[in-house]
Amino acid sequence: MYSNPGEGIVLTGVGRYTFANAGTYFAFAARWNDPGYNNPRAHQFDIMRQGYLDGRRGFALHESCWTLLVQAYHPAPVPHERLFDVLRSMPMAMTDDTTMDWGHGYGDLVFLRGETSYFPWEYLRFGSRGSQGRWFGTPYAINPLAFSQVERLLAEPPQTPPSRNPVPTSEASPAGHDPFDMVPEELCCAIAACLPTNDLLNLRLASRSFWSIFDTQQFWASRFRGIRSERSWLYEAAQVLATPGNIQRHDWRWLYRRTTGARIEEWVTNRKRIWDLILPVVDLMDLSWSELPADLPAPWTAPYIPGDPAAPGRSSPGDLWLQASGSLWGRGRWQDITPLQRACAQLKKVRVAIPTDEIVTIAASTVHLGSKLYVAGLTFTTTAGESLTLGYTNGRVGGAFQLHGETLTGFNLAIGLRGIQALQFVSRNHETERFSAWLGYPHNSPKTRRLSNAASGGRMVLEVGFDVRQARHDGLPLMLTMS
């Protein structure tokens, strides 16, 4: 996938890498080895951290990984432009042109050094691949698609489940004391379908009404439906279930057991590893940017302030501005990156005034990256019911803070290398200062009160920078001024 001037984002066919032209990649509509193909310069582009070639820059994607991404988005198409924005904002390891730092170890394919073995600003996050680099022959190198093996798995005759005794009275609620006694079995099954399997097994011990659910094909089939289901990586099973009447043609309880633990083959292990890495990428791409109106209403319009870094003729913040952020870079070329770690690319910026005396609710949208949670956007609601959203939303509220007669004065921040991992809202009622719970992931990160008292005269000016992948606070640098 590469960006080409005049064409936008282009998804190529099967490309080629050659050392003959100083490590050049070729993009073609079909395959690089088709008869008569001679590697024209118009099909050449640089990838990852290499930079641009004639304005073209791309990202190499494994064909199998792309296929799984397509299935994760099915039936909607993969949003190419959004994916490209996510990719171009990801930090690259300085020591490796092809390794992106997504906050994880690629399912143990890449060894992550302990946090005590490097300084936060150093490119020493990644160690050896696999087992001292010898990962060929391991599940990582097995084809995760393996369509013929999928067909054999789905066609495998089920084994007879072990026999069970009737409901033990000690393991279920006595008759007449079960609050679900009056609930129809169909509704109990619908409730069970929304629960993780372990929770359903525990619920059976508390309620007789859910004991029989364990033997229903509908419940076990639900383990294979939906992108968040426990067996969503076996998307072929979901395709079978999409055909009316097919639910009775398979033993879904057996298939669930067959794809558990030591019973699964290496291709399943590799597919599940890649699928688990793809789902957070889908979450990132599902974030929706909240565009501010061209003409903001008066309470939200940021005024000119002496020392304003955005004022004409000024190139650096003045004394009145307070800034807090992770390690960011702007829209420069990849070659401009220094050996010091840069965590994310700042690609968007918004600037508003917050009427702090009128704010009653602040809500945050969050998203995961690796093992940590980040804030992707903020929504401010006034006493008049007006709302303004900065950044991204995903339809899920990561937390909200209600102000009961207090005035918002600022933020406490938990900041990591990637940016702001969590926010704590600070408010004041007369002489009493109040702190909200942390929204985001504040653990193991330095915390600052630098911006806790940034409001003045009932107003606080925010200049907020976002990177495209999260928007964020995973590089959300907050620049506030006292006005």
Image (cartoon, rainbow, N blue to C red):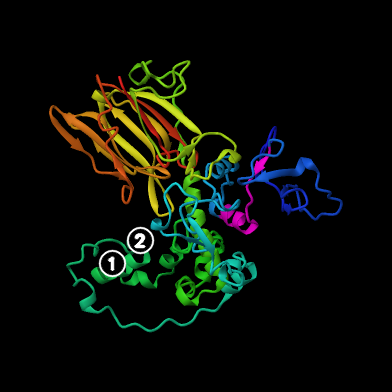
| 444 relative to 112, above or below | above
Please report the residue visible at 26 percent of the width from the left and 33 percent of the height from the top. Answer: 452
* Residue 410 appears anywhere in the view: yes
Other residues around mark 1 within 10 Å, as few (<14) / some (14–19) / many (≥20): some
Give the image quarter of residue 154.
bottom right
Q: Quadrant of the C terminus?
A: top left
Q: Residue 454: x percent and y percent? A: 28, 27
Q: Residues within 10 Å of mark 2 (few under 14, many from 20)?
A: some
Circle 1: element type = helix
- Whether label 2 touches label 1, CB < 8 Å: yes
- Can residue 245 be seen in this snapshot? no
Of residues 435 and 75, the one nearer the viewer is 435
Residue 305 appears left or right of 221? left
Q: CA distance from mark 2 to mark 1?
A: 10 Å
Residue 361 location (% of width, % of height): 27, 33
Q: Is residue 68 magenta?
A: yes
Residue 203, label in figure = 1
Q: Which is nearer the eye, 286 or 19?
A: 19
Q: Is residue 370 left or right of residue 408?
A: right
Residue at 34 percent across and 44 percent down: it is 398
Q: Is 130 drawn above or below residue 94 in the view shown? A: below
Front residue of this view, candidates 479 and 200: 479
Query: What SS does tag 2 mark?
Result: loop
Q: Is residue 143 magenta?
A: no
Q: Which residues are magenta?
A: 56-71
Residue bearing mark 2? 195
Amino acid type, mark 1 = Leu
Q: Which amino acid type is shown beneath numbered disc 2?
A: Leu
